[in-house]
Image (tube, rainbow, N blue to C red):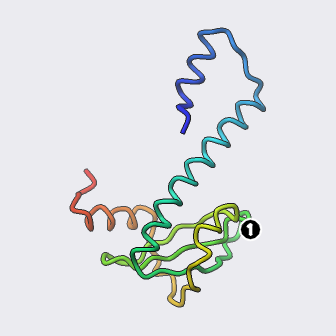
Amino acid sequence: MQNVGYMFHHQKESGDSMSAQQDVEMLQNTKDQGYKERNILVALLARLYPSGIKKTDIEGWDEAWHNCVYIDLPCGQASWHYHDNDAWMFAHLPPYLGEYDGHTTEEKYSKILRMIGLSGE
């Protein structure tokens, strides 16, 4: 993944200029790459633990992000939404038959840190 901070700093020093549109495109590409890398790790977890996929319907969200993978970890349920572009990573999974347990993002990562023996501090 590109180091965005370095790129902006380097361009400023060297006198290169980027249009606002180029800035937005570079940041969008960097964000998309970050999600893809995260999803690769989530796909690995989904192969190691019982898991499945289910569409969600979250008001105000882009429909392309309604895909969700649910993984039943030893520490409890974890779930991640993914974009239609990354659906191929989870296409082998069966439908998830359980229900969302209400965990927040913070709770999810706190549970995972405890599961691997880290306190998160």
Q: In this view, does 116 lie above or below 25?
A: below
The percent position of residue 36, horizontal first and vertical second, equals 58, 54
Q: Position of residue 121 (x, y in %)?
A: 25, 50
Label 1 is placed on what type of residue? Glu
Judge whether 17 appears above or below 44 on screen.
above
In the image, what residue occupies the spot 21% across and 62% down? 117
Q: In which quarter of the image is residue 31?
A: top right
Q: Is residue 30 above or below residue 116?
A: above
Q: How many labels does the image show?
A: 1
Residue drawn at 78 percent across, 32 percent down? 21
Q: Which element carries disc 1, helix, strand or loop?
A: helix
State the residue in front, 102 or 39. Answer: 39
Query: What residue sits 57% from the left and 85% below the top?
Result: 94
Which percent across, then down, holds residue 29? Answer: 66, 42
Residue at (50%, 67%) from the top-left corner? 43
Residue extending furthest bottom?
A: 97
Q: Residues within 10 Å of mark 1 (few under 14, many from 20)?
A: some
Q: Give the left or right position of residue 97, taking residue 61 as reference.
A: left
Q: Name the residue under label 1.
A: 63
Q: In which quarter of the image is residue 59?
A: bottom right
Along the viewing direction, whichever of 105 and 22 lies nearer the viewer: 22
Quarter of the rendering occupied by the N terminus: top right
Quadrant housing residue 20: top right
3 to the left or right of 56: left
